[in-house]
Structures are given as structure tokens and as C-alpha cells.
Amino acid sequence: MRDITFDNITETVIQAYSGAQDARSGEILALLIQRLHDFVREANLTPLEWEAAMGILARAAASTDGERNEFILLSDLLGVSALVDLLDGQQDQKASITTLMGPFYVPETPVLENGSDLTGDNDGERIVVYGQIRDSADKPLSGAQIEVWQNAPSGLYAVQDPSQPEHNLRGTLHADENGNYAFATAKPMSYKVPEDGAGGELVRAGGRHCWRPAHIHIMVTAEGCKRHISQIFDLNDPYIDEDAVFGVRGPLAVPYDQQPGEEELARFANIQRPFNIASVDFVLAPA
């Protein structure tokens, strides 16, 4: 490594990491180094531009702590998180499409009865979400666990806002013997991902915005099936085609303003009126 030149540096660096004990780590490192060096060459990156990039990473590190990970936000804003999710689901051809978990998931939320109303003291329109959980063989998944979380009408999640109850608009329920689930909740709102750090710098530099369309997070788990992470989007949200983190999937975008028919009114007679409805089924891939 004494005579490193523009022509041999990439191969030299790749060779330096060729002793990785884990074969997969070695493969990933070799690809990463090659792509990074190719990018620097193609972009003709200058020292000042390199310094600016290192500054972005330093500011991302400075704002990352136990409650906020700016590097994950950068991954989201560059579409990397979405690509990893889409890549992971490529082989799940008979399953529903998945999307991002996001940073606001909290495990072990209170277990609620199927059909419960999560609205609580939150203002805004009420919406009943319901559907069926099945496996890839179209068999209903009795007892499937459904975890739900979303933001409040203020646009903030409970973990962001100390004034909200700890488990506001969150809960865990289980599908009935036919795989059916249902819950009522306050209509979520569009909101901005954090823009006061490195992620905001990136978005502004690219001439974009930080808005996400309104959505309800769903995570479904069932024995013998792959964990299913999803979001139910408001089809009519103004940002449905401009999601800052590229998380919208066509089958997951449904209208939030559908009026219930007589069947839904009878089925959800225990839910305070008025309410709208949104129906989404989830098909889980085998584990």
C-alpha cells in the first residue's frame, strides 16, 4: 500500500478489507467501497463538497439519541428505508404489500377488546377501521395480534407530546375466530418529519418538503407468519403523492371519508356516531 494512485486506490481498499471473517460482511463491504468510489469519481467530488457531506453526518450524530435517530431519518428521506422494505417483500407474492414502521412504535401497548374505540378525549372526526387477517393460503388467522398507533389531531404522536396520555391512540387487539379485526379512532393528520436537523438540511437542499400524508400504523403478527408492518393512508390527503419518506403504497391508500351503510351501522352499533369507515384486509407471508 505504499504506492497508492488514482487508478489503484479502489482495488487497494477493497483488498484491504478482504480478510473479513464473515463472508456476507466481506461481500457488503466490497460492494459498498466500489459504489462509493464510483460515486466520488462520477460526481467529481471536491474537497469542499466532501467537507459539507461530513458536516451533515456530524450534525446527524449530534442530534441522535435514545429517542431520535437522525441517520434513520436520512435513510428514510433518501428512499433507502423504503427500498430495503420493498426488497424484503419481493418474494412475498401472495401477501399484502408492507411499508415502513417509522420511529414512533412503542411495544407492549394496552391490550384492548377487538372492536374497541381508541378515540378517547381526542377531537376530530371518528373513523372505524376494519378488515380480515389471512395467510397466503387465504386461511383466516384467528387470534392474530394487531398493534395500532398514530398521531393525534395536533399532528404529534404520544411519544413526542408529554401533554398526551402515555398510550394515546395506541393499542393491541386480536382478531376473532374468523380473522376479523376492527377498531375506531380519531382521524390522523398530515405531519412533518423533523426538519430541524440534518434531514431538514437534506430536504431543503433538494427542493423538497418534510410532509407525510395522514396514516394509521398497523403491525400484525401471527404464528407461522412473517411479521407484517403496514400503514393505512388517507387517499385524499394532499400529500398522498408527495410522501417525504416514500412510504405510500397504492393498495394501502383508502378514502377516510366513506360513509357507513346500514350493515356497518349495525355491526358497529357500540361506536359513537357519526363515523366514517375504512376497510383494509391484510394477507401475511409465511415465516
Image: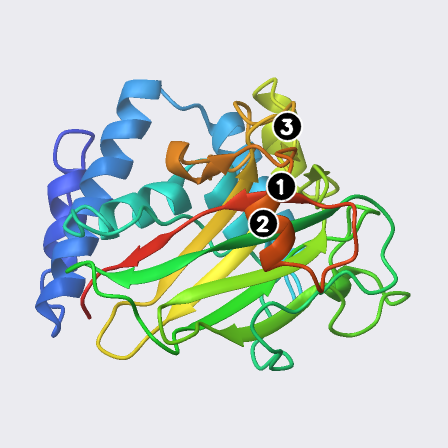
Question: What is the spatial separation of the Cα atoms under label 3 and label 1, in whole angstroms?
Answer: 20 Å
Q: Is residue 287 left or right of residue 161?
A: left
Residue for point 72% across, 60% down: 271
> What residue did someone put label 1 on?
260
From the viewer's perspective, is 38 left or right of 15? right
In this rendering, the label closer to the viewer, 2 or 3: 2
Answer yes or no: do the residues labelled 3 and 1 have beta carbons within 8 Å?
Answer: no
Tell me the residue that label 3 is attached to. Answer: 237
Decide: few, some or many residues near mark 1? Use Cα within 10 Å; few <14, some 14-19, many ≥20.
Answer: some
- Please tell me whether mark 3 sits on a helix, a strand or a loop: loop
Inspect the image, locate mark 3, and give the three-letter code of the amino acid beneath it: Asp
Q: Which mark is residue 274?
A: none
Left-right relation of 130 to 133: right
Q: Choose between 265 and 194: the one closer to the eye.
A: 265
| Position above or below: 61 against 59 | below
Kindly identify the amino acid type of the residue bearing the numbered disc 2.
Answer: Glu
Image coords of residue 143 (percent x, y)? 39, 78
Q: Of the numbered discs in the image, which one, if any, rests on residue 264?
A: 2
Instruction: Please rate how many residues cluster around mark 2, counting C-alpha atoms within 10 Å: few if below 14, some from 14 to 19, many from 20.
Output: some
Closer to the camera, 101 or 286? 286
Discs 3/1, front: 1
Horizontal and vertical percent position of residue 181: 48, 64
Dot 2 falls on a residue whose secondary structure is helix
Which residue appears at 18% of the width and 54% of the height?
Answer: 28
From the viewer's perspective, is residue 267 above or below residue 110?
above
The secondary structure type at the circle numbered 1 is loop
Name the image quarter holding residue 83: top left
Q: Nearer the viewer, residue 75 or 262?
A: 262
Q: Position of residue 71 (x, y in %)?
A: 52, 52
> Do tag 1 and tag 2 residues touch (Cβ < 8 Å)?
yes
Q: Quadrant of residue 25?
A: bottom left
Q: Do the CB atoms of the residues marked 2 and 3 lie less than 8 Å apart? A: no
